[in-house]
Amino acid sequence: MSAHEFGGEPIVWIEDRLLIRRFNAGDTQALRRIYEKYWTDLLSVARALAGDPAQIEDVVQDVIVGFASQAGRFALKGSLKGYLAICVANRARNVSRQGRQVDPERLVRARCEPAQQPDGSKAAEDVEQRRILTAALEQLPEEQRDAVVLHVLSSLPFREIARQTGVSINTVQSRYRYGLQKLQTLLNGQVEP
Protein backbone atom coordinates (compact mmCIF):
# COMPACT_ATOMS: atom_id res chain seq x y z
CA MET A 1 0.00 0.00 0.00
CA SER A 2 1.46 3.36 -1.01
CA ALA A 3 1.64 6.41 1.22
CA HIS A 4 -1.08 7.98 -0.88
CA GLU A 5 -3.55 5.16 -0.33
CA PHE A 6 -5.42 3.82 2.65
CA GLY A 7 -7.36 0.62 2.30
CA GLY A 8 -7.07 0.76 -1.49
CA GLU A 9 -8.54 4.28 -1.80
CA PRO A 10 -6.47 7.38 -2.45
CA ILE A 11 -6.19 9.54 0.68
CA VAL A 12 -7.68 12.52 -1.17
CA TRP A 13 -10.86 10.49 -1.83
CA ILE A 14 -11.12 9.59 1.85
CA GLU A 15 -10.80 13.26 2.82
CA ASP A 16 -13.42 14.15 0.19
CA ARG A 17 -15.82 11.52 1.50
CA LEU A 18 -15.45 12.93 5.03
CA LEU A 19 -16.00 16.45 3.71
CA ILE A 20 -19.12 15.30 1.86
CA ARG A 21 -20.44 13.65 5.02
CA ARG A 22 -19.92 16.91 6.95
CA PHE A 23 -21.33 18.95 4.03
CA ASN A 24 -24.48 16.81 3.96
CA ALA A 25 -24.82 17.29 7.72
CA GLY A 26 -24.93 21.07 7.22
CA ASP A 27 -21.33 21.94 8.14
CA THR A 28 -20.56 25.17 6.25
CA GLN A 29 -16.86 24.78 7.02
CA ALA A 30 -16.85 21.59 4.95
CA LEU A 31 -18.24 23.51 1.96
CA ARG A 32 -15.63 26.21 2.52
CA ARG A 33 -12.85 23.56 2.56
CA ILE A 34 -14.14 22.01 -0.68
CA TYR A 35 -14.28 25.46 -2.26
CA GLU A 36 -10.74 26.34 -1.18
CA LYS A 37 -9.34 22.91 -2.06
CA TYR A 38 -10.57 22.85 -5.66
CA TRP A 39 -10.97 26.54 -6.59
CA THR A 40 -7.65 26.81 -8.49
CA ASP A 41 -8.19 23.59 -10.44
CA LEU A 42 -11.72 24.61 -11.36
CA LEU A 43 -10.57 28.05 -12.49
CA SER A 44 -8.00 26.40 -14.77
CA VAL A 45 -10.69 24.31 -16.45
CA ALA A 46 -12.96 27.36 -16.83
CA ARG A 47 -10.08 29.42 -18.27
CA ALA A 48 -9.46 26.78 -20.91
CA LEU A 49 -13.11 26.36 -21.93
CA ALA A 50 -15.02 29.57 -21.19
CA GLY A 51 -15.05 32.01 -24.08
CA ASP A 52 -15.42 35.24 -22.16
CA PRO A 53 -12.66 36.05 -19.63
CA ALA A 54 -15.23 37.92 -17.55
CA GLN A 55 -17.23 34.69 -17.23
CA ILE A 56 -14.44 32.47 -15.84
CA GLU A 57 -15.11 33.12 -12.16
CA ASP A 58 -18.86 33.23 -12.77
CA VAL A 59 -18.74 29.74 -14.29
CA VAL A 60 -16.96 28.36 -11.22
CA GLN A 61 -19.22 30.28 -8.84
CA ASP A 62 -22.32 28.93 -10.60
CA VAL A 63 -21.02 25.39 -10.16
CA ILE A 64 -20.20 25.93 -6.48
CA VAL A 65 -23.64 27.47 -5.83
CA GLY A 66 -25.31 24.55 -7.61
CA PHE A 67 -23.22 22.13 -5.61
CA ALA A 68 -24.06 23.92 -2.34
CA SER A 69 -27.77 23.57 -3.12
CA GLN A 70 -27.35 19.79 -2.92
CA ALA A 71 -26.38 19.87 0.78
CA GLY A 72 -28.02 17.09 2.70
CA ARG A 73 -28.58 14.90 -0.34
CA PHE A 74 -25.34 14.83 -2.34
CA ALA A 75 -24.08 11.32 -3.10
CA LEU A 76 -20.45 11.15 -4.20
CA LYS A 77 -19.68 8.68 -6.98
CA GLY A 78 -16.02 8.79 -7.94
CA SER A 79 -13.83 11.74 -7.08
CA LEU A 80 -15.17 15.08 -5.92
CA LYS A 81 -12.57 16.91 -7.99
CA GLY A 82 -13.70 14.99 -11.06
CA TYR A 83 -17.35 15.72 -10.41
CA LEU A 84 -16.73 19.45 -9.95
CA ALA A 85 -14.37 19.67 -12.96
CA ILE A 86 -16.97 18.02 -15.21
CA CYS A 87 -19.61 20.44 -13.88
CA VAL A 88 -17.33 23.38 -14.70
CA ALA A 89 -16.65 21.98 -18.19
CA ASN A 90 -20.39 21.56 -18.78
CA ARG A 91 -21.17 25.06 -17.49
CA ALA A 92 -18.36 26.60 -19.58
CA ARG A 93 -19.69 24.74 -22.63
CA ASN A 94 -23.18 26.13 -21.98
CA VAL A 95 -21.79 29.65 -21.65
CA SER A 96 -19.91 29.18 -24.92
CA ARG A 97 -23.04 27.95 -26.66
CA GLN A 98 -24.82 31.12 -25.60
CA GLY A 99 -22.90 33.00 -28.28
CA ARG A 100 -19.42 33.14 -26.80
CA GLN A 101 -16.35 31.72 -28.54
CA VAL A 102 -14.21 29.17 -26.71
CA ASP A 103 -10.68 30.52 -26.25
CA PRO A 104 -8.39 27.47 -26.13
CA GLU A 105 -5.41 29.75 -25.50
CA ARG A 106 -6.52 29.63 -21.88
CA LEU A 107 -5.28 26.03 -21.79
CA VAL A 108 -1.84 27.25 -22.69
CA ARG A 109 -1.91 30.18 -20.24
CA ALA A 110 -3.26 28.05 -17.42
CA ARG A 111 -0.60 25.39 -17.85
CA CYS A 112 2.41 27.27 -19.24
CA GLU A 113 2.62 30.66 -17.58
CA PRO A 114 6.30 31.48 -17.07
CA ALA A 115 7.57 31.64 -13.51
CA GLN A 116 9.77 34.61 -14.40
CA GLN A 117 9.72 37.34 -17.02
CA PRO A 118 11.50 36.11 -20.14
CA ASP A 119 13.70 38.42 -22.18
CA GLY A 120 12.09 40.28 -25.10
CA SER A 121 12.97 37.75 -27.81
CA LYS A 122 11.80 34.83 -25.68
CA ALA A 123 8.53 36.62 -24.90
CA ALA A 124 7.88 37.26 -28.60
CA GLU A 125 8.59 33.60 -29.38
CA ASP A 126 6.22 32.47 -26.61
CA VAL A 127 3.47 34.76 -27.91
CA GLU A 128 3.85 33.32 -31.41
CA GLN A 129 3.79 29.72 -30.13
CA ARG A 130 0.66 30.47 -28.09
CA ARG A 131 -1.01 32.00 -31.14
CA ILE A 132 -0.26 28.90 -33.21
CA LEU A 133 -1.40 26.54 -30.45
CA THR A 134 -4.55 28.56 -29.89
CA ALA A 135 -5.44 28.31 -33.55
CA ALA A 136 -4.87 24.55 -33.46
CA LEU A 137 -6.94 24.04 -30.28
CA GLU A 138 -9.81 25.99 -31.81
CA GLN A 139 -9.95 23.40 -34.59
CA LEU A 140 -10.49 20.45 -32.24
CA PRO A 141 -14.00 19.07 -31.87
CA GLU A 142 -15.57 19.98 -28.53
CA GLU A 143 -15.38 16.43 -27.11
CA GLN A 144 -11.69 16.11 -27.95
CA ARG A 145 -10.88 19.55 -26.53
CA ASP A 146 -12.78 18.69 -23.33
CA ALA A 147 -10.92 15.39 -22.94
CA VAL A 148 -7.56 17.11 -23.38
CA VAL A 149 -8.43 19.94 -20.99
CA LEU A 150 -9.86 17.69 -18.27
CA HIS A 151 -6.98 15.24 -18.45
CA VAL A 152 -4.22 17.87 -18.69
CA LEU A 153 -5.52 20.66 -16.45
CA SER A 154 -7.44 18.71 -13.86
CA SER A 155 -5.16 15.69 -14.01
CA LEU A 156 -8.28 13.56 -14.10
CA PRO A 157 -7.72 9.92 -14.98
CA PHE A 158 -9.58 8.71 -18.05
CA ARG A 159 -11.68 6.41 -15.85
CA GLU A 160 -12.93 9.37 -13.83
CA ILE A 161 -13.71 11.45 -16.92
CA ALA A 162 -15.64 8.48 -18.32
CA ARG A 163 -17.57 7.97 -15.08
CA GLN A 164 -18.48 11.63 -14.77
CA THR A 165 -19.44 12.13 -18.43
CA GLY A 166 -21.32 8.85 -18.83
CA VAL A 167 -19.25 7.56 -21.73
CA SER A 168 -16.92 4.58 -21.85
CA ILE A 169 -13.29 4.87 -20.86
CA ASN A 170 -12.38 3.78 -24.40
CA THR A 171 -14.38 6.70 -25.79
CA VAL A 172 -12.61 9.19 -23.50
CA GLN A 173 -9.20 7.73 -24.35
CA SER A 174 -10.02 7.86 -28.05
CA ARG A 175 -11.16 11.48 -27.84
CA TYR A 176 -7.97 12.39 -25.99
CA ARG A 177 -5.75 10.44 -28.39
CA TYR A 178 -7.47 11.83 -31.50
CA GLY A 179 -7.29 15.34 -30.03
CA LEU A 180 -3.56 15.03 -29.43
CA GLN A 181 -3.02 13.51 -32.88
CA LYS A 182 -4.94 16.31 -34.52
CA LEU A 183 -2.99 18.89 -32.52
CA GLN A 184 0.26 17.24 -33.56
CA THR A 185 -0.79 17.27 -37.22
CA LEU A 186 -1.89 20.90 -37.03
CA LEU A 187 1.27 21.95 -35.22
CA ASN A 188 3.69 19.83 -37.22
CA GLY A 189 6.49 22.12 -38.24
CA GLN A 190 4.86 25.22 -36.73
CA VAL A 191 5.97 24.96 -33.10
CA GLU A 192 9.43 23.88 -32.09
CA PRO A 193 9.63 21.35 -29.25
Image (cartoon, helix red, strand yellow):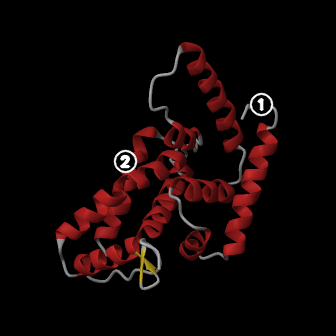
Task: Residue 184 in the image: state x and y as whole percent.
Answer: 77, 44
Q: Quadrant of residue 62?
A: bottom left
Residue at image x 18%, y 69%?
28
| Residue 192 picture quarter | top right
Q: Is residue 100 above or below residue 150?
A: above
Q: Which residue has dot 1 on it? A: 190
Given the current orientation, which residue lies at the most extreme bottom position? 7
State the image coordinates of residue 104 (x, y, percent, origin top left): 59, 42
Q: Nearer the viewer, residue 155 or 128?
A: 155
In the picture shown, does residue 103 fall above or below 77?
above
Give the side of residue 66 with respect to residue 9, left or right.
left
Give the residue type at disc 1. Answer: Gln
Q: CA distance from mark 2 to mark 1?
A: 33 Å
* Mark earlier in primary sequence (2, 1): 2
Mark 1, secondary structure of its residue: loop
46 relative to 173 in the view: left or right: left
Q: Nearer the viewer, residue 6 or 126?
A: 6
Does residue 156 appear left or right of residue 18 in this picture? Answer: right
Instruction: Say which residue label 2 marks.
Output: 57
- Residue shown at the point (34%, 80%) measured from the top left: 74
Q: Position of residue 137 (x, y in %)?
A: 67, 43
Near mark 2 (Cα within 10 A), the count class, few <14, some 14-19 or many ≥20, is some
Identify the element where label 2 is drawn. Answer: helix
Q: Nearer the viewer, residue 87 or 163?
A: 163
When asked about the image quadrant of residue 36, the answer is bottom left
Q: Position of residue 129 (x, y in %)?
A: 66, 29
Image point (48%, 41%), residue name: 52
The amino acid type found where label 2 is placed reads: Glu
The quadrant of the image that shows the C terminus is: top right
